[in-house]
Amino acid sequence: MFKKFIVLFGFLVLFNSEAERYRGASFQKLENGLSVIFVDTPRADSLLVVLCVSSGSTDETDKRGVANLLCHMFSRKLKEKADADPPQYRLESNSYVGYDQSEYYFYGKTENLDGFINNLGATFSGFTFSSSDLNESKKIIEQQISEDQQIDRNRVRHEARKSLYWHSGYGSSCDVDSLRSISEEDVKNFKNRNYVNGRATLIIAGKVDKKRALEMVNKCFSKEKIESTINRLQEPPHHGSTTRITRSSSQVSVPIIEMYWRIPNYRNEKGKALAAEIFINHLGEVLQKNLVETQKIAASISFSYSFWNHDCGDFCMTITSKNSDKVEEVVTAVLSEIKYIASEKITEEQAKKAARKLYNANNVFNIEVDVIDFVNWISKKIGACYDFDFLKSYDQFIDKFDLNEVHSQAKAIFRNDPCVISILTPAEKKNAN
């Protein structure tokens, strides 16, 4: 997500502006509850408009996939209106729907700003759709699901994440049956509940007449001030047992084992977050050395993790086995090694080495402090809660981390069994007659 904001705003020239301001940006909340952010850019003819709605899959109370379906129809409606309404202008657009946010991007020329705002306001405030619109979007999304599900590894991963986030459905994809069950009423209710001015932010980047732009926003967006309470599930603890998923596939030649641990919410605990990251990176290095290079139990071990910017996070370790007949032995060996390392087996010297490696890998964040500050400021305005503040503290943290905290976080996460273990094994080849 950080890279996306760097792409969008990395070109910004930062200088003072009016209203509530942050270097090159100004913010104000309109009487109808809509937030507007202006960002000054050096190119007078380039325009970027982003509509951010604090609504995503976490707001789905009944039907999985309704947020994605609404986003798809909303994007199509914007495109259709841009193509049909005079004056004609070229619209390059993209959209994204995530856990807690939906975003719509529009790229064009500054002279087209009135058309963009008119399009957005009319669609956001008066969005309607027909049965044929709904069915067409369902058909397209169903095709995307079908293509995704043809890859066995994706199917297993979707099933694993569905089990990992059993309490909220976060991380699980919409299945075809759920998609087909979504009615027009479901979409309308979701839109009316979540796509309201109080949960929307309009970002306008370019050299624009701000007074004129605000007049257009007030004219084109609904005057009705509707506040919508965001009431989302809090991350519960581990649910007590490990879910095992085992599938065979003709698409793999060696077994692929994935283990998932839930990670605590570190949003307001930067020290703990960095301590956990130090251990995780040390863990990866030790497993590679002990199990791959020395004992040769596994062919490769890799991992990915996310816990900085979300209310929920996870650690996923992927192990490629060397032998289809010894999968359980590999699982046992890996888990034993992880628990052993988590039992205060990281020294201060090893922790410093991992911390230094992290600092070098993330040095870009120290170089681009202005950009990070800007992203922090703007993300809080749009309700995204992407907190990168602690990334700037790597240089101070390297020599001041608490080894006891590293041990504590290692035990809190990795002394437990994984929440999910998924195993994809090669399908047995049938003998040709």
Image: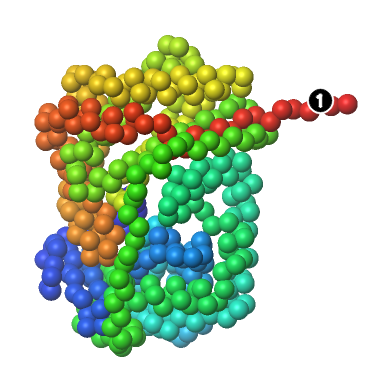
Secondary structure beneath label 1: loop
Residue drawn at the location 28% of the way across and 46% of the way down: 265
Residue drawn at the location 36% of the way across and 31% of the way down: 416
Residue drawn at the location 42% of the way across and 11% of the way down: 294
Residue 382 picture quarter: bottom left
Residue 54 picture quarter: bottom left
Residue extending furthest toward the top: 294
Residue drawn at the location 28% of the way across and 22% of the way down: 343
- Residue 301 in sight from this viewpoint: yes
Inspect the image, locate mark 1, and give the three-letter code of the amino acid beneath it: Asn
Residue extending furthest toward the right: 433
Percent coordinates x, y for residue 390 in the rendering: 18, 44
Report the label total: 1
Q: Nearer the viewer, residue 417 or 210?
A: 417
Q: Is residue 257 left or right of residue 414?
A: right
Disc 1: CA contacts within 10 A as few (<14), some (14-19) or many (>=20): few
Q: Nearer the viewer, residue 320 or 2?
A: 320
Q: Is residue 212 above or below residue 109?
A: below
Locate the C terminus and report the quarter of the image it occupies. Answer: top right
Tell me, what colour scheme is on the image?
A: rainbow
Q: Is residue 393 above or below residue 197?
A: above
- Residue 207 in sight from this viewpoint: no
Q: Is residue 330 above or below residue 258?
A: above
Residue of label 1 = 431
Q: Nearer the viewer, residue 175 or 5?
A: 175
Percent coordinates x, y for residue 73 in the rendering: 51, 72
Q: Is residue 367 left or right of residue 262?
A: left
Percent coordinates x, y for residue 93 in the rendering: 44, 67
Residue extending furthest toward the front: 240
Residue 134 picture quarter: bottom right
Percent coordinates x, y for residue 178 in the rendering: 58, 62
Q: Is residue 387 above or below residue 86?
A: above
